[in-house]
Amino acid sequence: MVSKKKALEMIDTIDQMFPDAECELKHSNPFELTIAVLLSAQCTDNTVNKVTQDLFQKYHTPEDYLNVELSELENDIRRIGLYRNKAKNIQKLSKSLIDKFDGEVPNTHQELESLAGVGRKTANVVMSVAFGAPALAVDTHVERVSKRLGICRWKDSVLEVECKLTSIIPKDRWTKSHHQLIFFGRYHCLARKPKCGECPLFDDCREGQKRYKASLRAVGGVS
Ligand code: SF4
């Protein structure tokens, strides 16, 4: 693994690459954000935004989601992966918001994670984006790039990745870094075709070096 100092230098470089990174899930309040993040599991933000464009016109409150048959809500989000399960969770979550939180999205990790379909990552996103609290959510992009760069170990759990990143990155940068690491993974260090040839972190990146050597071997450049 790289040192903390080197890891922070890498984070600084990513900061310079994506200074304006921000949440790409369209929403206008904490409730819409919570629904959007719940829908985004194993689905692109782009697809979620296409679906929520109509969804948020039709449903405004937790009551709205409960006032329709489950099959109707399923149909409204059917373009999203795992839509049946997600529709069920949206209705359960809506009921909990009404029963326990006066219809409002709560602003603590513990309360958020008590809601159906809301895990640590979703709670972190809602806490940081909707309520401005310091939190660093680890999604698939954040996990992949942190491991490729050697900031974390390949065998680290998602929680270990979060702990490692929050121990390296100053607290007032957690939210911004979360978005920047996502942008870095989404637009530069892509899962299948990372842009190693034009990467400012190439010299320090073990994954980039490994891929480069493999490409040389493939053309007979090195043994
Ligand atoms: Fe990702 Fe390649 Fe850059 Fe490493 S060198 S961070 S694998 S794009």
Image: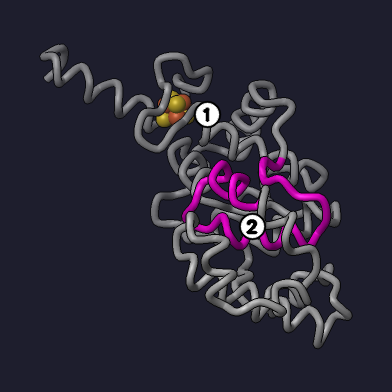
Q: Does the magenta portion include 32?
A: yes
| Ligand 1 image-quadrant field | top left
Residue furthest to the bottom in view is 99
221 to 12, vertically: above or below: above
Q: How is the image coloured?
A: one colour
Under circle 2, the secondary element is helix
Where's residue 113, x and y in %? 68, 74
Name the residue type under label 1.
Tyr
User: Is 137 contained in the magenta span?
Assistant: no
Q: Which residue is mark 1?
A: 187
Q: Overall secondary structure of the magenta stretch? A: helix
Q: Is residue 2 above or below residue 34?
A: above
Circle on res. 37: 2
The magenta region covers 23-52
Horizontal side of residue 61 vs 76, given as left or right: right
Position of residue 221 in the picture relative to residue 185 (left or right): left
Q: Is residue 196 visible?
A: yes
